Structure formats: C-alpha cells, structure tokens
Image: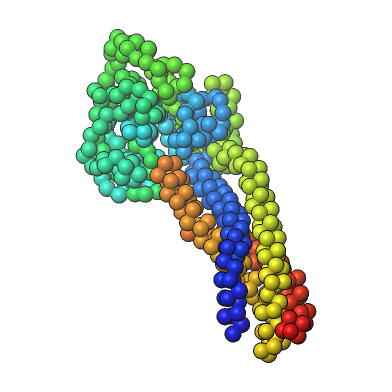
Amino acid sequence: MILQFIKTNILSKKLRNFLTIFSILVSVMLIIMVQNLTAQLKSNVVENAGTYDILVGANGSATQLVLSSMFYYDNPIGNINISYYENLQKDSRIVKVVPIGMGDNYNGYKIIGTSTDFFDDGYELKAGTLFEKEGDVVIGSTVARATGLSIGSTFSGMHGLTESGGHEHADFKYTVVGILAQTKTPSDTVIYTDIQSVWAVHGLEHDHDHEEGEEHDEETLMAEEMEHEEEEHTTSGHGTTSSEDLITALLVKTTSLANQVLVTNELSKNADIQAINPAATLRRLLVTLNAGEVIVTLVAYVSIFLSVIVLFTTMLSASIERRKDISILRALGANRKTVFLTILLETLIIALIGAILGFVIAHLAIGIAGNYTAVNYGINISGFSVQTSEIFVLIGAVLLSVLAGIIPAVMVYRTDATKYLK
C-alpha cells in the first residue's frame, strides 16, 4: 500500500517531479564527467610520456615540443643538428635514443620518420613486419581503418602536416609493410617509416646512411639542396631544411636517474636545443588545467545545491497539497512514523532516479568522447572506467536530497489526521 501511494504521488505531478529529477541528473552528470575525464586524461598523458627520460628538440616551448614529438598534436618547433643524435648513440649512459622526423602527411595522418627501436616498448604488429628499407611504412590501427590501406598498399605523401598543407610528393612511393595492433595511444593515428625515408623524400642524404666504401657525390648533394632551398619545410618552422638539420626531436632513455640529470644538464648547455623531462613538463601543464577543472566542478556542486533546494520546495509543496491524502492514510491505520518514512522514501526514490540517470548518461557521454579522442588523437578514454570519487558524488547527492525531505516529512508527521477528514 505504501509503495502504491508513493507511485501515485510521483506520477500525479509528472512535470514537477521530472524537473526535479532532471536538475539532479544534470548536476551529477557534470561532476562525474569533469572528474572522470580529467582523471583519465591525466593518467593517459603522463603514462604515454613516461617511456622516455629525456626529450631533445629545438629551443622554444617545452610543452609544444612534447605535444608535437610524443603526441603528434602540435606543429614542431624546428629541427636539430643530426650530430646530437650521433653523439648520444655513442654515449654509454644512454640505453636508447630514437629519432623523430616529420614534415609530411597522408590524408591528414602524419608521416613520422623514426627507427625500429621505437617499437620496443608496448607495440605489437597486427599484420606484416617492421620497416626494413627506404619507403617501407608501418601504419597505426586508426590509419588502416580510416584510409583502407593494407599490407602491400602504396601511396605518396603530401608535403606539410595537414591534408591541405602543400604539394604531393608523387615521385616517392611508400609501401605498407606492417600494421600495428591497437595501442590506444597517439601511435594509432600515425604512419611510421624509417627516418631515412623522410630525408629521401625531400632529396636529402647523410654520410651515416651510406654503406662502407660509398662516397658522397658532393656536386649532386649540393644540387639537391639548392633544388629544395626554396621549399618551405614544415618541420623546421624557420624555412628550409639542410643536410645538417634532419631530425625534429630525439627520445632518450638513460641507464639511471643520475645519468638522466647529467645528460640533461650537458645537453642544456647548447644554445640551439632544449633537453627536458617529458613527464615533468606534462605534469606542469596538467596543473594549469586543474584550474579549469576546479571552476567547472564548483559550478556543478552549486548546481547540486540548487537541485536540493528544488527538491525541498517540491516535497514541501507536495506535503501541503497532500495533507488530506495523508490523513486518509493515517485513518487507514498508518501511524505517524510510517507516514514520516513514506515521505522520506519518496524523496529518496526521486533522488536515486536522478543520480543513477546522471551516472549512466555521464558514462555514455564519456564513451562517446573517448571514441572521438581515440580516433583523432589516439588518447584512450573509456566510458567503463569508474573513479572512486564518483561513488562519493552519488552518495552525497542522495544524502543531501534525503535531508531536503526531512522538513516536509516532519510537517506531515505532525498533521492532525482528523482535521482534514471533516
């Protein structure tokens, strides 16, 4: 009888109760989305950057260097002299140094020149092999799905980092030799090739890449450089590319924390480059983002407070309107305590409906956002990831709502049953 009474009360004022539920839903949804998305974004970004101890690149913004070289999001600052790469390869304090070179794209997906050492940490091939010769490429899972490229497919790159950025390098053909398994990282949206392919497509070579006994044709090299002198190269950001400026960045892993500090300090003495810890740089960036998170969260909590006021007003109004119904319930044998708990239970049900719907819709929205970030930026955000803070948000929203129903319940508790039955 009690549950039927509550059901009738809720359905009798559909619009008013719908608006109350909606206000709770929106408040809970906002808080959960902000907290969940921020937590997952921080975790993914710092984790992706933590593979390497040092990132070396041209002088400029450290944040831009990390975003462009490790997340392929921003335009690179410029190129650095290849001698840094060669010297670090010989350094006994270095476990691994991986070059990053960029400047072209295919259908908007960046073509990144690197070495096979890049794939040592957390990468698996879904099909094919790693690149072995000039022109071979390994493509990310998103690239394969979006472009239709498969093992054996050939294509030409487009100059620049955007699809409409420049002319096609029609005289140089890339061949797909491998497809990466999904990593849920920015690598899913990238085309990888040997760094020498990046140099070759722009008509550049380097002594290090020639077999023993093979000599440079200096006149040919000078002619090739002059031919490309007028071509604005996106990777440098300062004009043209020369034979000494072939690498955009270097990813470095050292043998120990002490060596990381030593190598970083030594590299930082060079005026034309910067050497940074990528994870530390990203943490500083995320601290800045925290200010925005705090503001949005504050707005969401104010929204919940307003929702509680709306719920209080709704239940108070309903209690006044239903005094006669409550009197009838009392006359049928329900005691004051039962009537009090009935009003609280009704408040609890409305709050639970709003909070649960807010939780579900928030995670659906996070899942949709996750699909977008995975396809476009290679950042994995899951709608199934639940943060501990979300449980406290749900409990808090429900408790506040129940507290809002106490005063109306007390008013009903004190109702004289005989007064409204005359």
Point out the image quarter for the N terminus.
Answer: bottom right
User: To which quarter of the image does residue 85 belong?
Assistant: top left
The answer, for residue 385, to whether it is visible in the render is no
Residue 357's place in the image compared with 299, above or below, is: below
User: To which quarter of the image does residue 332 belong?
Assistant: bottom right
Residue 83, image x, y percentages: 45, 23
Residue 317, image x, y percentages: 70, 67
Q: How is the image coloured?
A: rainbow
Residue 170's place in the image compared with 41, above or below, is: above
Residue 348's place in the image compared with 271, above or below, is: below
Q: Residue at x 66, y 45 (%)?
A: 295
Q: Residue at x 51, y 58 (%)?
A: 361
Horizontal side of 299 relative to 71 (left or right) equals: right
Residue 53, image x, y percentages: 53, 40
The answer, for residue 274, to whether it is visible in the render is yes
Residue that protrudes farthest toward the left in the picture = 152
Closest to the observer: 134 or 102?
102
Residue 244's place in the image compared with 154, above or below, is: above
Closest to the observer: 240 or 384?
384
Horizontal side of 260 relative to 147 (left or right) equals: right
Point out the image quarter for the C terminus.
Answer: bottom right
Q: Residue at x 51, y 61 (%)?
A: 360
